[in-house]
Image (spheres, grey):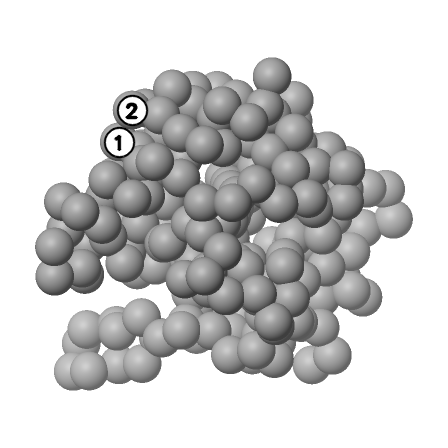
Amino acid sequence: NTGAARFLPERLTLPELRRAAAHCEGCDLYRDATQTVFGEGPSQARFLIVGEQPGDQEDRKGAPFVGPAGRILDKGLEEAGIDRQEAYLTNAVKHFSFTLRGKRRIHQKPTIAEIEACNPWLNAELALLKPEMVVVLGATAARALLGAAFKVTQHRGEVLELGEALAVATIHPSAVLRAPDRDEAYQGFLSDLRLARHSCS
Ligand code: URA
Ligand code: SF4
């Protein structure tokens, strides 16, 4: 396993990428997961929204952000005035990672090696979409897009430059669900999404 690069298609389009990613064996995560969960959304999307990796429900359904974290994200996007039709949703790592506890599949944070192995897919999505604004959800997406030195806790809610695009990092919607004060965490998340919304045309 030497990463996803050798699985990239010759012709770089979003449909070709999605087809090729379905057969990726760039790291070991493909072995136990159900399927590759590729990004979804219109190719003209102005917003690229990047999460960590698919969860249990995403793994079963094959689509990003369709579980509990997705409900928080949907609510935040709607309240921030970001239409789902102008947003392309994806993850830094495209396969679910878990450990078994009895019959339950417990989500496991991806390793740095897995984030790096999967990065060619995310980079290709970014290069093809050319979004105006990248919304970086949590530490894994930040590691993939902004590097090891970037700390979401310190630099969330700032407008950053990411190549030709702007970017705003915020906490992951799952962190909102786990927060001791969920309402406060959600309000912070929402205000970062609003900043992203108002920082592009
Ligand atoms: N969490 C993520 O980061 N991505 C998903 O698609 C679902 C949950
Ligand atoms: Fe390929 Fe990424 Fe899946 Fe690893 S997680 S097998 S690199 S698509």
Query: Does the Cβ of the disc 1 residue fall within 8 Å of ligand 1?
Result: no
Residue 118: x percent and y percent? 63, 65
Residue at 54% over, 60% down: 142
Q: Is residue 118 visible?
A: no
Disc sitting over residue 58 in the figure: none
Given contact means CB atoms under 8 Å apart, are the residues at marks 2 and 1 in contact? yes
Give the class, few, some or many, for how many residues have Cα within 10 Å of label 1's Cα (few <14, many ≥20). Answer: few
Mark 2 vs mark 1, CA separation in Å: 6 Å
- The residue wearing badge 1 is 75
Residue 19 or residue 115, whichever sits in front: 115
The amino acid marked with disc number 1 is Lys
Residue 164: x percent and y percent? 77, 37
Query: Which quadrant would residue 64 be assigned to in this image?
Result: top left
Q: Quadrant of the N terminus?
A: bottom right
- The residue wearing badge 2 is 79
Residue 170 or residue 72, whichever sits in front: 170
Residue 149: x percent and y percent? 61, 71
Q: Secondary structure at mark 2?
A: helix
Q: Is residue 47 above or below residue 160?
A: above
